[in-house]
Amino acid sequence: MSKSGAILAVALPIAIIGVLGVGGWMVLGELSPEAEMADELPKGLAVFTEPVRRDDLQLTVQSQGEVRPRREISISPQISGRISYVSPAFIDGGFVRRGDVLVRVDDADYQLSRVRAQSQVASAEQRLARERAETELALQDLEDLGISDASPLARREPQLAEAQANLDAAKSQLRDAELALERTIIRAPFDGRIRSKDVDVGQFVSTGQSLGRMFGTDIAEVALPLTDAELGRLGLTFAFEETEAEPGPAVVLSANVAGQLRNWQARITRTAAAVDPQTRLISAIAVVEDPFGEGASDGMPLAPGLFVSAEIEGEVLPDILIAPRAALRGKDQLYIADPEESKLRIRNVEVIFSDPQGVYMRSGVDAGELAILSPIQAPFDGLSISLAEEDEAES
């Protein structure tokens, strides 16, 4: 094959392919649809919103504390001796009434002391009676003799005073013996429960020795630590004490007992005397009356040592603006959605306080405006936004 023939054999297929490619491109160009111009601008950042509402607000404060009885004492004898009797109710957990006999100390020695004191009183009374008779005789003799300036000794005044003093002393000793005899019986000073018992029959006890402990069942208390801001929310002061004209805030105490949530109704009656130097908090004292009776929760008493949560009712603030807590940005800003212009607006608001449920404001926004809940990076006033649809929120 000649050189020109070889070139033609290579160039011809290339030319044919080029012609076919150009023709195909032109055909595709004729068949493809024309591009349409966009009628709408791109949507702004989609955000979720919730309207700001206006309502009266019942302020509440949450706290926790341990239940304790108002009265708890150590039971101790005022005399020494051997225990001769212990009440069946004097056991850990036993209920006792005021005046119930808890313990008796053997009183044989104290009975003898009372008899001796009675004998001394009788002797002193006899000596006083004799001295009175002798004094009358002496005065009669002085009168018969016509002596009007006789000395006190001649009128037997010192002797009579001594006899009277001896009788008074004997009576005091008798009262002492009777008191010691009465103190051999140890009674419950108030209605309550026995927390512990430390003695039993036959044991010798000394004056002041602890026989056990008991606490009153009339009133239970819970010390609830509060911050200064929480005190203000409740309308309390450092020197608050409940009166008929100014009752304390209501409190609901709650705890899980026997696998069930229990609630007890209480009230704040006073605040503690001083601020805790470690926590810088001050305690409000919540009181439950008759915690083992009418104050119990469906029969479940409020027992000392139980750790409870407390919800304290504070003041009612009228006509307050309320938004979800997620709407608050920083300390005092809300992002508001302007649905007409599809713009974000930044508002400074006067925040009263906030909690996990919401942010509560006096001013800065209007009721019905849409507070933005979605997180936004690099926000600015006038940012283009769009309101997320309900199906987007559900997804």
Image (cartoon, rainbow, N blue to C red):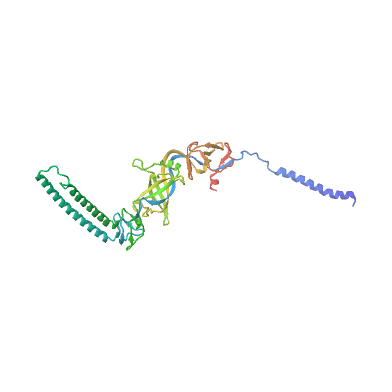
Looking at the picture, how far across and down is residue 113, in whole percent?
A: 25, 58
Quarter of the image where one finds residue 115: bottom left
Across and down, in percent, residue 36 comes to 65, 40
Give how far across and how far down residue 332 sits, in percent.
51, 38
Does the rendering let one see residue 86?
Answer: no
Q: Is residue 95 visible?
A: yes
Q: Extreme bottom residue here?
A: 202
Name above or below for residue 288 compared with residue 347: below
Please give left or right for residue 137 compared with residue 337 in the image: left
Is 90 or 176 nearer to us in this picture?
176
Residue 223, given in percent of the width and then of the height, sits at 41, 48
Drawn side of residue 39 relative to residue 128, left or right? right
- Residue at 55% across, 46% down: 392
Q: Residue furthest right?
A: 2
Residue in front for this viewpoint, 22 or 135: 135
Is 120 left or right of 284, judged from the image as shown? left
20 or 56: nearer the viewer: 56
Given residues 251 and 383, the one toward you in this image is 251
Please name the residue shown 26% across and 60% down the image: 109
Which quadrant of the figure has residue 212?
A: bottom left
